[in-house]
Amino acid sequence: MNKGQVTNDFNKIVTERRSIKNYDTSVKISQEEMTEILTLATTAPSSVNMQPWRFLVIESPEAKAKLAPLARFNQTQVETSSAVIAVFGDLNNFEKFEDIYGAAVDKGFMPLEVKEQIHTAYSGYFEAISREDLRDVVLVDGGLVSMQLMLAARAYGYDTNPIGGYEKDKIAEAFGLDKGRYVPVMLISIGKAADNGRPSVRLPIDQVAEWK
């Protein structure tokens, strides 16, 4: 368990997670601790292990003021949270192939010939895939890392709220990112809860799953 974690009880982390909208404004998450949380989050799986997620940690008053009009239905989360993390999917993620697979070879996780086989197999795929299909891929991967981020936050004693209601067509450019490259996945507010949040009902498994 990392030094900043308060629990590694998986059942407690999962069952006690709540979508929190109001946070203790006196609590700030250090960059070191946020880095640990994000590091845990990025152990999530992704297509071809290309890890297309990119995070913008919006924590300064100036950055929050820029975000506020783009998330006007979620002002409490923006104003009271320690930070709001904007999760994006990078459509140019294959550019990181050498960083990822070269390191895997260096660490002895795979032989060089396997890395080269994977590069040959997928370089054509990434050249040929449509932007729409690639967008679907990074949205799925972005959802996986976002859920893992929220669970990692719980392990550190923080709470979160996933936010889909914001100006997705404007957020990349508002923060100086290329909107043609970076696909918005969601916003995640994070901080120390100022209340307990509401428990919520889940449908029974016999209504959402079937066996064949």
Image (cartoon, rainbow, N blue to C red):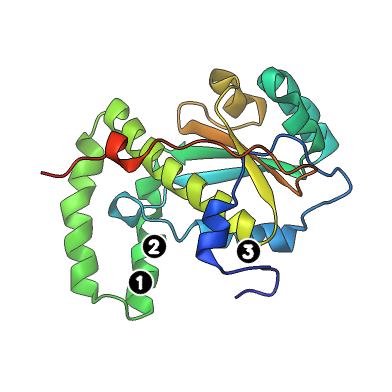
Q: Which residue has dot 1 on it? A: 104
Name the outermost residue toward the right. Answer: 26
* Quarter of the figure that contains the N terminus: bottom right
Q: Nearer the viewer, mark 3 or mark 2?
A: 3
Name the outermost residue toward the bottom. Answer: 108
Q: Which residue has dot 3 on it? A: 36
Image location of residue 112, percent across then percent down:
24, 74
3 and 1 marks in contact (CB < 8 Å): no
Q: Residue 40: which quarter of the image?
A: bottom right
- Evaluate whether residue 91 shows in this view: no
Q: Residue 132: which quarter of the image?
A: top left
Image location of residue 50, percent across then percent down:
36, 52
- Left or right: residue 41 versus residue 130 is right
Mark pair 3, 2: CA separation: 19 Å
Q: Are there few (<14), some (14-19), or many (20+) residues within 10 Å of tag 2?
A: some
Q: Amino acid at mark 2?
A: Ile
- Left or right: residue 211 versus residue 181 is left
Pick the front one: 150 or 183: 150
Q: Which residue has dot 2 on it? A: 100
Image location of residue 66, percent across then percent down:
75, 26
Q: Amino acid at mark 1?
A: Ala
Mark pair 2, 1: CA separation: 6 Å
2 and 1 marks in contact (CB < 8 Å): yes
* Quarter of the figure that contains the C terminus: top left
- Evaluate whether residue 162 shows in this view: yes
Q: Nearer the viewer, mark 3 or mark 1?
A: 3
Q: Amino acid at mark 3?
A: Glu
